[in-house]
Image (cartoon, helix red, strand yellow):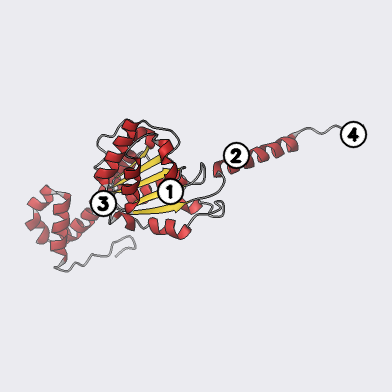
């Protein structure tokens, strides 16, 4: 046997029912129609196991790509690159527990509260991406986009609503959001980022009668993570400006000696 030769795959009889179940799950009807030929030939059986593995891996890859496109999460900084020392306050343990997605098993909501630029959207995107990796359906939308088009949102296992509080909305929009949260209440999880404390949501939805009830349903089963600090984007912008200024000083021609 040459070095390039492959070691024969030894299969136990118990492997065949498992292979057939996998073929059924993949709806490989042609393979199933010739199953007698497969189970009667050890070489074909071994090849079938490899084929099933290829098909499952490729379908999982294509499914993830499709759900990534549909989720509209876009580009974001991975959690591994998050500067935990930058916020003045952020419960790292709570965030890491959220990344296990255990909150989705009992349809618990998550609210990330903090001023602009402290990482709320980035953390929400990481939660959504983790849910996608684990086979969930996800939709990322801003509050403005959400309230402009509420159709077909109940089908997503995890709904991410970004930027509640940056704009003010009409009573009709408040009613629509209340309707959405009510329909998902105790059935599916929703992640919201906001720069406003709940006591200030009356300014986001001025004069809306449903604001108190909306918050009540949202926080009844909810993990609230408060983040405090200055804008990380502003910090990076200042660092880039300082670097460019230093580069300009370094490249400035010096006066020649007399």
**Residue behind mark 1:** 112
**Residue behind mark 2:** 237
10 Å crowding of disc 2: few (<14), some (14-19), many (20+): few
Label annotation for residue 257? 4
Q: Earlier in the sequence, mark 3 or mark 4?
A: 3
Q: For the residues carrying marks 3 and 4, which lies nearer the camera in this image?
A: 3
Asked whether the viewer can see residue 20, the reply is yes
Q: Is mark 3 on a helix, strand or loop?
A: loop
From the top left corner, tell me how far across and down residue 255 is, in percent. Answer: 85, 32
Give the CA separation, mark 1 to mark 3: 19 Å
Residue 168 as seen in the image, left or right of residue 105: right
**Residue behind mark 3:** 186
Residue 11 as seen in the image, left or right of residue 236: left
Q: For the residues carrying marks 4 and 2, which lies nearer the camera in this image?
A: 2
10 Å crowding of disc 1: few (<14), some (14-19), many (20+): many
Q: Which of marks 2 and 3 is nearer the N terminus?
A: 3
From the top left corner, tell me how far across and down residue 258 is, in percent. Answer: 92, 31
From the top left corner, tell me how far across and down residue 152 is, in percent. Answer: 24, 37
Give the CA separation, mark 2 to mark 3: 41 Å
Q: Is mark 2 on a helix, strand or loop?
A: helix
The residue at 13%/53% (across/down) is 24
């Amino acid at each position: 046997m040459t070095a390039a030769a492959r070691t024969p795959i030894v299969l136990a009889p118990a492997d065949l029912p498992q292979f057939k179940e996998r073929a059924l799950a993949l709806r490989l009807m042609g393979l199933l129609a010739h199953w007698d030929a497969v189970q009667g030939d050890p070489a074909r059986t071994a090849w079938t196991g490899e084929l099933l593995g290829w098909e499952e891996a490729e379908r999982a890859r294509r499914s993830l790509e499709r759900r990534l496109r549909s989720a509209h999460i876009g580009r974001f900084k991975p959690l591994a690159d998050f500067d935990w020392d930058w916020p003045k306050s952020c419960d790292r343990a709570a965030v890491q527990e959220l990344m296990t997605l255990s909150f989705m098993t009992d349809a618990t909501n998550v609210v990330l509260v903090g001023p602009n630029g402290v990482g709320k959207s980035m953390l929400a995107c990481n939660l959504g991406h983790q849910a996608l990796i684990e086979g969930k359906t996800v939709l990322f939308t801003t509050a403005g986009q959400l309230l402009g088009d509420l159709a077909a949102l109940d089908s997503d296992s995890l709904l991410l609503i970004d930027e509640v509080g940056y704009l003010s909305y009409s009573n009709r929009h408040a009613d629509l959001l209340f309707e959405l949260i009510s329909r998902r209440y105790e059935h599916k999880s929703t992640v919201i980022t906001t720069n406003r404390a709940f006591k200030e949501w009356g300014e986001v939805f001025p004069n809306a009668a449903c604001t108190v009830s909306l918050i009540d349903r949202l926080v009844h089963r909810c993990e609230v993570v408060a983040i405090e600090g200055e804008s990380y984007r502003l910090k990076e912008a200042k660092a880039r400006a300082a670097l460019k200024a230093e580069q300009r000083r370094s490249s400035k021609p010096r006066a020649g000696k007399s």
